[in-house]
Image (tube, rainbow, N blue to C red):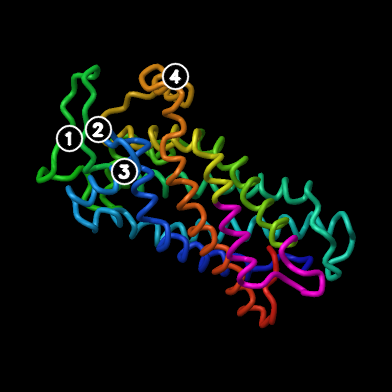
Amino acid sequence: MGSFQLEDFVAGWIGGAASVIVGHPLDTIKARLQAGTGYGSTLSCIRTVYRRESVFAFFKGMSFPLASIAVYNSVVFGVFSNTQRFLSRYQCQESEAGPPHLLSDLLLASMVAGVVSVGLGAPVDLIKIRLQMQTQPFRDANLGVKPRVAALGEQPAYQGPVHCIATIVRTEGLAGLYRGASAMLLRDVPGYCLYFIPYVFLSDWITPEAHAGPSPCAVWLAGGVAGAISWGTATPMDVVKSRMQADGVYVNKYKGVLDCISQSYQKEGLKVFFRGITVNAVRGFPMSAAMFLGYELSLQAIRGDHVVTSP
């Protein structure tokens, strides 16, 4: 286990697909709460979206994440696992004995995974949010502009993922695909530290010493708790990222991360940065539980193991 292993990437792809299917409806609600207008609460948002756009609105923009987030998670899990394995081998000079997890190794591996994730994940998140937000009623009296999409029944800004990508590149250039990437970097680097580290230590803590690896139940619980912790604490910067990425559907009003934070605070106060925290924490549990369980069970099947092994 001390060398580079490709199966981590394959297992990460399967886990990523499972997480998208489980979590996308709540992800849509989260995006509407953070970047939209007219929603008083989570339940109010769910009722409003269902009443205006039917149940299919909760799956709006899912085709692109399903195809791309699987690849994204494949890279994240593969990079994390192989980096952590390399660091453990380098420090302990043993590839098979399975040394105890060191916090420093997990921290560095999580940070590397977070940085790498932005390169792939920023365009994916951007397209997903643009598709989720294009039917969101838009109003901003201070701007005095007429939105491209103001009500249902009008022509949507984007006909699908491919058209969305083409439109962004045409109107904003290639750099437009990375709008909000700086906010995503500030979210994901600490976010992945609070994702992988709690998972590893919690799964180790739950697993009896006599067992070679955590059970599927332990993986599910540890993964879910880690996801809730990570997404809950990442909410303030997730709000900023969502607002910056949804901004371009109608008109660009944020010049950068600090400008977005400043405008949001001046207009809505400190509470705006915790908008969607309930949805984030709630969706974080099933999404991450499905992701880690899919990852670990796939890894077990690929390797022909009889126990689940930690990343």
As helix, strand or loop, the secondary structure at mark 1 comes to loop
- Helix, strand or loop for disc 2: loop
Where is residue 240? Give x, y as percent.
44, 32
> How far apart are the two marked residues, 1 and 3, measured between alpha carbons?
13 Å
N-term-proximal mark, 1 vs 2: 1
| Label 1 with label 3: CB-CB less than 8 Å | no
> Could you tell me the amino acid type at mark 1?
Arg
Which numbered dot is residue 130?
Answer: 3
Q: Which residue is mark 4?
A: 262
Q: Residue at x 74, y 62 (%)?
A: 204
Residue annotated with mark 2? 250
Residue drawn at x 70%, y 50% as measured from the top left: 109
Labels 4, 3: front one: 4
Q: Which mark is residue 148?
A: 1
Pointer 1 and pointer 2: residues touching (CB < 8 Å)? yes
Estimate how packed mark 3 is, as few (under 14), some (14 to 19) or many (20 or more) residues with alpha carbons within 10 Å. many
Query: Which quadrant of the figure has residue 244?
Result: top left
Q: Which residues are magenta?
A: 205-227
Query: Of 248 and 48, which appears nearest the observer?
Result: 48
- At label 4, the amino acid type is Ser
Q: Amino acid at mark 2?
A: Tyr
Whole-percent x, y for residue 53 in the image:
19, 51
Q: Tell me which label, 4 or 1, sits earlier in the chain.
A: 1
Of the image marks 1 and 3, the number of the one nearer the N terminus:
3
In the rendered view, does 118 fall on the left or right side of 130? right
